[in-house]
Amino acid sequence: MMVVNNIRKMRDISARARGEGGRVVFVPTMGSLHEGHLSLLKRGADFGGLLVMSIFVNPLQFGPGEDYLTYPRDIDRDTEMAEDAGADVVFIPNEAEIYPEGFQTSVDVPFLGRNLCGHFRPHHFGGVTTVLLKLFNIVEPHVAIFGEKDYQQIVIVRRMVSDLNLDIEIDTVPVVRERDGLAMSSRNGYLKPDERMAAGAIYKALLAGKSCFDSGSRDASIIIGEVEDVLSVQPMVSIQYVKICDLDTLEDVDTIEDGALLAVAAMVGRTRLIDNCKLYTTPEIDSCTDGSAGTERAMVW
Amino acid sequence: MMVVNNIRKMRDISARARGEGGRVVFVPTMGSLHEGHLSLLKRGADFGGLLVMSIFVNPLQFGPGEDYLTYPRDIDRDTEMAEDAGADVVFIPNEAEIYPEGFQTSVDVPFLGRNLCGHFRPHHFGGVTTVLLKLFNIVEPHVAIFGEKDYQQIVIVRRMVSDLNLDIEIDTVPVVRERDGLAMSSRNGYLKPDERMAAGAIYKALLAGKSCFDSGSRDASIIIGEVEDVLSVQPMVSIQYVKICDLDTLEDVDTIEDGALLAVAAMVGRTRLIDNCKLYTTPEIDSCTDGSAGTERAMVW
């Protein structure tokens, strides 16, 4: 496995693979790898070709007062895990080369970025799309793989790729969970033991909402109420939002028709956690109960 | 010469040329071709490879009350002229395919777009960069060629290309002028005969400013005053701005050191015209007096 720090070199490696007719498969990350990231790599390996993972803690996507400085970084452990998971290249660019003096271009997907996390993190998705477009232009992948925990990110990235005529397939992998259902996140490491216990309520709350939906409720406010009831039992969990929205437009939905996204963001102590669950009338494509599609590692129940 | 309307087909033609090891050279235009555009094609032909011109009147770069609807369109004449000038492909996409329903991604280079025309046309450059990035992603050129009449556009496009890690060389061609010095523009056709006469004052004003600079003045306000004096003689010419700014940052300059841009925007009747001239202490690279660098067609004096 190669570790590449230089943009030109990354570009050359990718161009060579493309020139030889191979596929380039890309897994962009901020490092601090966990099972969720490994499921992305595992899925990536299914495509064949050159499997590239990037590690870059992107300052643009953190707001003032957020955890850019404290975000966990452990390059040695990450590169080892990436190699074990089958990555061919780990691309770790320098911040100074990604954002040189005078850098100012921004890429924005404004309407899809308004609701859910975008409301609470107003510049977050602009930072995500800007750095991803840069990484896409450097790595030039045929396929890029994202995790469904960041569902809004997926919808936004797909829109950007389509709007900007990028010839990249966006593939996704279901949420990977801890044994108590907590969605894997690099930020889980921030949690103190009692916060970690309390954080399990987020998934339980999603399941309560899903159960309400499965029992026939289609009224978003009733389902949201069920979710909030479970969360409000935990004094350490402070709800940022519980929303039910359209899977494509991410606009709030009052009455669920074919399907919808149930999404939660909550502060547990000082740690911001998100999770989501699709509500479908056809249960076999519901990410809350199905760990299929290349995710044997997904611990979901 | 091929005329291509479909994005997929344009992408395939370009990919084939690239795959065969050829260069792809790109001249993006809004059509209504004149000698200025032809000088871009002529320069493009010097690079060898597949010479692609696009024609697309981009609604995103027009503001409310501007001339999007009346902008001159003559595809038959344009394709004929492009063929005569050596284009291999004229790409004329449909607006519905460029901006399908739900399109919302924007690309912005905010600081370079603040001054000069950006001040008077606040969404113009965002529209330019967004459509250019799309066209770059479709055509995938090695080189793209722009005219120096739109100097601010060049600086912004170069910044975007660098910031987004696009592997595209941006090449430029000096302003091409009518016999009285008026910079060629598709909008010159809007001018009534007396307005057309009056419009010649813009270039004369630039020459007066340049002459002041060449005589040793380095004080921007004095040079700007000379330019304004020439323009103010023409009652049909209403100044929007006369500015002297840094060639790279486009920020206003009080005292000229090595070089600067002298830029003018004026309304002549209801027609908005722009022009510019570089002020250099080394005269041989001054676009006001030099028609070299692949621009024998440039009528500059």
Image: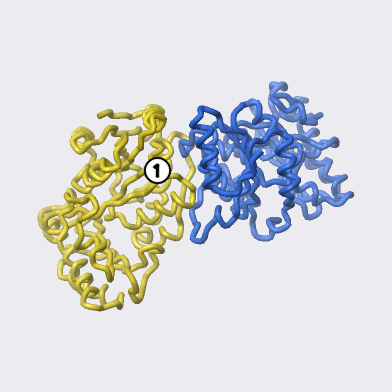
Chain colours: A blue, B yellow
Q: Looking at the image, can residue A186 be seen?
A: yes
Under circle 1, the secondary element is helix
Relative side of B146 to B211, left or right: right
The residue lying toward the viewer, choosing from B8 and A27, is: A27
- Residue B226 occupies which quadrant of the picture? bottom left
Residue B130 % position (x, y): 42, 45
- Label 1: few (<14), some (14–19) or many (≥20) C-alpha neighbours in 10 Å: many
Q: Looking at the image, can residue A246 be seen?
A: no
What residue is rendered at 64% in x and 56% in y?
A63
Residue B241 % position (x, y): 29, 66
Relative side of B40 to A252, left or right: left
Kind of residue at disc 1? Val
Residue A17 % position (x, y): 54, 33
- Residue B269 drawn above or below residue A225: below
Q: Which residue is mark 1?
A: B131
What residue is rendered at 38% in x and 64% in y?
B250
Relative side of A292 to B124, left or right: right
- Residue A151 drawn above or below residue A292: below
> Where is the N terminus of chain A found, in terms of image quarters?
top right
Q: How many marks?
A: 1
- Residue B112 occupies which quadrant of the picture? bottom left
> Where is the C terminus of chain A found, in terms of image quarters?
top right
Residue A14 % position (x, y): 54, 37
- Residue B90 drawn above or below residue B32: above
The residue lying toward the viewer, choosing from A275 and A141, is: A141
Q: Chain of mark 1?
A: B
Relative side of B225 to A261, left or right: left
What residue is rendered at 22% in x and 42% in y?
B32
